[in-house]
Amino acid sequence: MARTADVVVIGGGLHGCSTALHLALRGLKPILVEKDYAGRHASGVNAGGVRQLARDIAEIPLSISSMTIWEHIEELVGDDCGFASHGTVLVAESEAEFADFRARVDDLQLRGFTHEELVDRTELRRLVPAVSDHCPGGVVSRRDGAADPFRTTQAFRRRAIEKGAEVIEGVTVTGLSRIGTQWRVETSDGPIEAPKVVNAAGAWADRIASMLGEPVPLEVIAPMLMVTSRLPAFIEPVVILRGRKLSFKQVGNGTVVIGGGHRARPFRDQNRTVLDWQKLAVSAATVWELFPVMREATIVRAWAGIEARMPDDLPVVGPSSTSEGIYHQFGFSAHGFQLGPGTGAMMAELIATGATNVPIDGLGIERFAAG
Amino acid sequence: MTGPSDLSSSYDLVVIGGGPAGLAAAALAARAGVSTVLFDENPGIGGQIYRGITSTPIKNRAVLGEDYWAGASLAAEAKASGAQIVTGATVWSLDPSRQVGVSIGGEARMIQAHRVIIATGSLERPFPIPGWTLPGVMTAGAAQTALKAHGLVPEGRVLLAGSGPLLWLLAAQLLRAGTTIETILDTTPRSNWLRALPHLADFLLSPYWSKGLALLREVRAKVPVIPVQRLSAHGEGKLQHVEYQSAGKDYRRQADMLFLHQGVVPNVNLANAAGVAHRWSERQLCFEPVLDVDSGSSVSGISVAGDGAGIAGGTAAVERGRIAAIAAVRAVKPSASVPDPQSVRQRLQREELGRGFLDALYRPADMFRLPEGETIVCRCEEVMAQQIHDMAAKGCEGPNQMKAFLRCGMGPCQGRLCGLTVTELIANERHTRPADVGYYRLRPPVKPITLAELASLPISEAERKAVER
């Protein structure tokens, strides 16, 4: 006898856990299937940036709706998730870059988005006193912040269970088939039947899509991060660059997390990554130039989480283009953490009511359809 | 002094660690004509057992004992072999494609190895009693290091506590160097004698037997030894007194220094970070790498030799280093002549003969491995035993989740001082076996490096451009 549910969610990252929670809050019965444990991959080990800044226009509405949830995260999941809001600052390293930023902020204003704000040299120094002298200004998104990624994913998982979701870990999905109006999800722990299925399988989501005859050009990536030993507090906001890959953040305990998108070699079938120290050295050199105060800091750990990237760096969100009852939620291309709470809420709304008020135009899987 | 600019970009064999296993391996391989480099992070070669062998200020040979001085010929052999020996060289990364990240004098380099022998030896098992983090309390190994490397002899009211052959060796060395040890608090459970008895016949045939007995006699003639069942350290800001229970009665004793030791365990950090598969040893209560008869690990081209492969002692480490080196030479240069590994294995078997007895006799008591209450488990992040108990009871299944919840094991020591304790506490709380709980997944750098060192890694212009958008 197959188990039954209203929705099967495949993948126990932040997105899967968030969707499961929001489905349960709407009175539906979801079963979440996770091949390892919740937050084992990118959701648990990312930089924790909660950023609206510098996003593609197509995902700004999702990001803004998510931000509202982040600001009341404890009410939703019973844990503050380590969320602290000190803003994100995009630092311009040249006048040319600063001019580009000005044009971007003007464009956003015309579209009615006001979360990005241009800051001059003086305000930049006030926000980020330790920044090197060569930087003429930047952009700030003041409501942005950072959270603890594993704690956040676990909090969503825990609250989802409390609200009636079932979470099955260490179980792999091996097949999907249509039986009447039901989907039969074959797993390593027996079949589950449900009318609806959410594919939130991250770096493994293309395999689920392939089972549905809906292949996608997913690239498996592993963005690298490193963390220093504790330093005296010297910076509050998260700092990012555009020209060179860098994201930079001092956590409450004094450690500094350095990331920005340099990638390790992923081996998704082995749950392993092999770091590329040449590229981490480039990150180190960038920090060296931008923050002289960091030069004697000690790197204590470096790692990478496995996740999915799409060719246009935008997520795949919304209903399947070929199979009724299937919904996709993957491919967040190294910036999905902030989107997790809001995307889960939107997906649950979409699944429960058939429609959503959050615009997700341009994020559908049909954009990769052959021909 | 060898600097980073003296290194080649690749070697047939990179040996990591200059203790007995590493020295023997490098010497054998280099003599067979294999291009070999040996990295050791200390200022001199010798490892822990032969620390300071080429430089120790202690010239009276009797203090450190003839077994120590046997290291001198091993060191001389390695130096004469043609292997490039680089001291002050910290290996901070090793990946499955055998890229070795090393820092020398503040500069970092990546070296490509055809074969790697990890010979990073052992470290002392955590001894998490109440008060073990107080100044004045240190491991016996740290005291031995100070003695060998700098001739430092502890003063004041000195107590030793714990269990295991090295505790007796250190006691003997300290006494010969002129230290007054007030008392040795022996934490070996009495019931261990029964467990050890079946191994006695083998032990009597092993070289440990006569040496061990002589050592025990020497120490017991000068220092009272008290069997204890409980132990804690106390003081305001530093160690002032030690409390213990012996034969059901509680005692309190003033002390300035307390040296703790309850055996050594493989230092698995580098092998673990390189992806080498490990398994739990119930006999030695620790994780050890899974190895084939040639010391080869689950990662192609990477071998583990010496105590890092499972505790067997310094003389066994020499033979294990040779076995790994023979396999490396055969892989890299099949035409070279090497000793018959079978004869090396036979010598190794003889060296390992007494191990079963020692492991059973000196198996540390549960209460000294499974702390409770406010006793610190993770020193770097100051995580208490009760927190681990509570989190495991709430459903935390393994050390990697524990890391995420409590940050234990995330400090600069990378779990060296808490890893086994955390695994055993979780297993105990969840009524399962340490083998099922597993160990931390360790992340490089396995030894901290500075941002400046990392930034000094030579990067080609192509690489720099390739990573910019």
Image: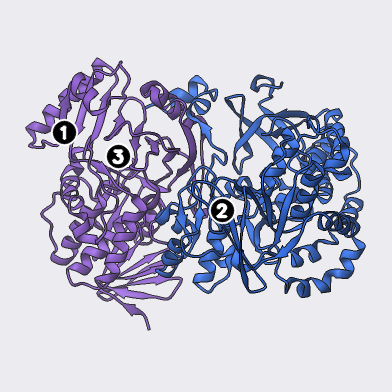
SS at mark 2 in the image? loop
| Residue bearing mark 2 | B132
Q: Which chain is blue?
A: B
Whether residue B23 sits left or right of residue B234 in the image: it is: right
Quadrant of the image for the C terminus of chain B? top left
User: Where A245 sits versus B232, above or below?
Assistant: above
What's the colour of chain A in the image? purple
For image coordinates 28% across by 47% down, the residue present is: A315
| Residue bearing mark 3 | A312
Quadrant of the image for the N terminus of chain B? top right
**How far is disc 3 from disc 1 in space, using C-alphas?**
22 Å
For image coordinates 30% across by 60% down, the residue present is: A155
| Residue bearing mark 1 | A116
Task: Single out the mark in the foreground, 2 or 3.
Answer: 2
Q: Amino acid at mark 2?
A: Trp
Q: Are marks 2 and 3 on the same chain?
A: no
SS at mark 1 in the image? loop
SS at mark 3 in the image? loop
Query: How many circles with numbers are drawn on the protein?
Result: 3
**Where residue A298 appears, x then y in whole percent?**
48, 33
**Where residue B168 appears, x then y in whole percent?**
78, 54
Whether residue A45 sits left or right of residue A238 in the image: it is: right
**How far is disc 2 from disc 3 in space, using C-alphas?**
55 Å
Res. A218 visible in picture: no
Task: Single out the mark in the foreground, 3 or 1.
Answer: 1
Res. B281 visible in picture: yes
Whether residue A328 sits left or right of residue B462 in the image: it is: left
**Where residue B190 appears, x then y in whole percent?**
73, 72
- In the image, B305 versus B367, the foreground residue is B367
- Number of other residues with Cα within 10 Å of mark 1, as a class: few under 14, some 14 to 19, many 20 or more: many
User: Where B393 sits versus B319, above or below?
Assistant: below
